[in-house]
Image: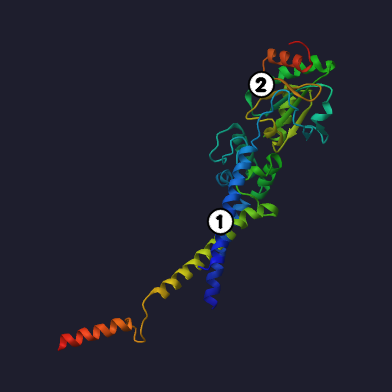
Amino acid sequence: MPGRLRIALQAAAVLVVALLLALLGWKVFNREEAPDAGRPAPDFTLPHLSSDEQVSLASFRGKAVVLNFWASWCGPCKDEAPLLESAWNRYKNQGVVVLGVDAQDFDVDAQRFVDRAGITYPVVRDKHGSTLGHYGVTGFPETWFIDAQGRIVGEHVAGPLTEEDLERNIKIALGEPA
Amino acid sequence: MTRKLLAALVVALAVVAPAAASEQSPTLPELERELICPTCHETLAASTSPIADRMRAFIRARIAAGDTKSEIKDKLVDQFGESVLAAPPKSGFNLLAWVLPLVGVVLAAGVVGFLTYRWSRSRKAEEPGQSANGRFSLDPELERRLDEELARYDA
């Protein structure tokens, strides 16, 4: 085999291996993980479940946010919906917003869930699950607490909330002693 | 010639007709193999998650309503995004996923063919020469020595 051809083939092989290694490195170092407390909450803009209105997390800056990820087929989500609705009614005049993010779901099922549970807090629809990776969501329900400066605070509750979880973390988000 | 054309037509029909029937009258098992559960990232056929059950119910309802396979897939893509498809669509950027493996196979076949050709040529160059009557010819020095030995033996 002529020297030039051999060098070209070897260079191509090295290039392919380097490309595969770069891909592997990118995949390893770009893992989406749950943000730590004190870090800015990843922003997003998603359509409201019941209208074409676009809702962004940043639009709630200045308020404490209870960010709840759910889906209509998730059993524990049904159990905690009344707790979230109750907290919304108690705290909405004190600078607290409960924001539901429905994902991996059918529109019609999500709307039926909201109607049956009597949910009045804002709910957005993440059809493609784009926010799940940014928040490291691995199942439903999961809840995050965000302070008025848009930072993650308190505990990240992976699983159904209790009344105590809600009260304690809302107080932290409001900057009150828990 | 006519026979060959007819045979080609029969083969083409044998391939196209089932695909057209599947598009017009899809079945749940075939759609289960072509769709992914968004929570567990397995095909619907392999998944037992609640959303997979709900998707199966949706597909059954759409089949009963007379939707084509494409219509059912489009509705599910609208709800869950393209990641719900087990194979990427054959359009736009996703077309690369279909074309690149073929390009790779053709390139690999070309490289293997070229290397085989060069290898066989180099082997031929290394082989001893053949005379016109197909017999191998010896080194002239060796042939001279062999003739001498044979003459001595005859004597």
The chain under label 1 reads: A
Viewer-nearest of labels 2 and 1? 1
Q: Residues within 10 Å of mark 1 (few under 14, many from 20)?
A: few
Left/right placement of residue B124 relative to residue A123 reads left
* Residue marked by disc 1: A13
Residue occupying image coordinates x 55% and y 61%: A9
The residue singled out by tag 2 in the image is A157
Asked whether, in this view, residue B24 is left or right of residue A149, the answer is: left
What is the three-letter code of the residue carrying label 1? Answer: Ala
Q: Where is A147 relative to A57, above or below?
A: above
Image spot of residue B32 (x, y percent): 57, 43
User: A94 or A51, which is in the foreground?
Assistant: A94
Name the quadrant of the C terminus of chain A: top right
Give me the residue at 33% from left, 81% from top.
B139
Q: Could you tell me the amino acid type at mark 2?
A: Val
Query: Considering the numbered disc 2 on the image, is that residue within a helix, a strand or a loop?
Result: strand
Local packing at callout 2 (Cα closer than 10 Å; few below 14, some 14-19, many 20+) is some
